[in-house]
Amino acid sequence: MKRYFFALILGLLMASCAEQKPVEGYSWEEDLHERLLVDFNRSEQQIKDYISHYIPDVSDEQMRKWEESKALECMVLDGQKLYFRNAGPNLFRIDKECIAIKNGPATGDPSGGEETEEERDINKIMQEVEHSGNNVVEPKRFRITYTLTVDADAVPAGEVVRCWLPFPRADVPRQKDVKLISTSLPEYKLSPEKYAHSTLYMEQAAIAGEPTTFSETFEYTTCGEWHKIDAAAIQPYDTKSKLYKEYTAEREKHIIFTPQMRALAKQIIGEESNPYLQAKRIFRWVNDNFPWASAREYSTIENIPEYVVENGHGDCGQVTLLFMTLCRICGIPTHWQSGFVVHPDWWNLHDWGMIYFEPYGWVPVDQSFGVPDYADTDAERDYFLGGVDAWRMIVNSDYGMPLYPKKIYPRSETVDFQRGEVEWRGGNLYFPQWDYSMEIEYLE
């Protein structure tokens, strides 16, 4: 009886929270300002000290040149010039001369002369696809415990903390047998499949002096996928179909067909009319022109594809949105997909996409994995335009969509959803106020 009463009260709390609105006086402009101060928190001297490890005589004049070229990212906040927290390391990822200084003279075979783990993975997937005739192969099963911990006293004692954790999708062909094993609280809500962000929601009251912890354990099986696409087999799209209209359209944020983007798309594809060959030109152009660099939070960027083009670099999600935008301008359907890479040697947040070709249907595309350095065959060079490895956990099928249940305040990550989201009735809890961790077991 007590358990039933507790569940009833918790259910009412959940329902009431979902109907609340931001407290009076909340301002997105003020929120954004505070987020920028988190990302831009380095002084010029701090950045010069970092650079001097590699370029001891770095001058003010050189600093200005790097700023003008966008290799050093900075902005004026509260009347003070501040640099992006990773501006120093990024300089040696973006500027070619700085890259050469840090890396030193190249020697020997850049591939190392040995087959990499990634190369072994994708070659195994290609061989299995060729042998079996199936496009989804090499299943791997995982058990993951994901924990989000809110700092002690981040929320007043007794106030309800609302938390959304990432949960693997069960509606993607290469990801299956999703099973929830346990949760840190007895009451929770899983998002319906129709939601683009797959979440597990819980809430609990904060206790004075103690962190507030949310945890889940689940299992799932995921596979590698590869499609051997023949450009000669590509067929025209049904431009009147619902799929075509939805996935070649602009989006309010980040997929905007600006004059600059339209001109770029036209320049890249030239006279090519085959959708697959158009996509390949876009894929390789983005690969060749935008090195990976540590990214500021997406919520602080108005138009991510334009930001990538203007700044000359991008992380996985940023170059994916650029690729998607250019493809949609050309009338090629694309959509977002993201979650995690859970490789035995490393795990991290990761974003990629899906692209639609007739008669192949939806196939994966990972713009940030791009054209591998080790590739010496066309199949390897084009692998990630139609293929992915098996070390993925898919959480999202779109970006910037509503959470379930509805969140009161703007998300910490307004575009993607991976680390989780937390809020209470007084406001959103931004990333510095909580942390997350993942324990991965490789079951088979």
Image: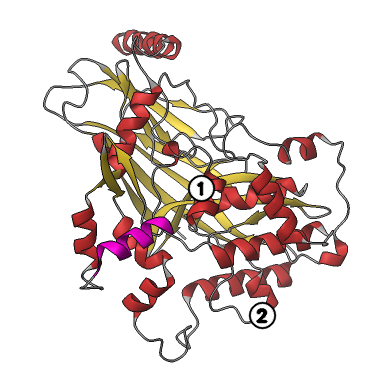
Look at the numbered disc 1 and give the secondary structure of its residue.
helix
The amino acid beneath tag 2 is Thr
On screen, residue 376 versus residue 117, left or right, reads: right
Q: How many tags in the picture? A: 2
Q: Which residues are magenta?
A: 58-70
Q: At 71% from the left edge and 53% from the top edge, which residue is drawn? A: 265
Q: Position of residue 297 (x, y in %)?
A: 40, 42
Mark 1 packing: few (<14 Cα in 10 Å), some, or many (20+)? some
Say which of 109 and 94 sits in front: 94
Residue 162 visible somewhere in the drawing: no
Q: Position of residue 404 (x, y in %)?
A: 49, 24
* On screen, residue 142 above or below 60: above
Q: Position of residue 127 (x, y in %)?
A: 66, 74
Say which of 191 and 432 sits in front: 432
* On screen, residue 310 above or below 397: below
Q: At 63% from the left edge and 74% from the top edge, which residue is drawn? A: 380
The amino acid beneath tag 1 is Tyr
Q: CA distance from mark 2 to mark 1?
A: 33 Å
Q: At 73% from the left edge and 35% from the top edge, which residue is drawn? A: 246
Q: At 28% from the left edge and 40% from the top edge, which residue is drawn? A: 38
Res 11 → quadrant: top left
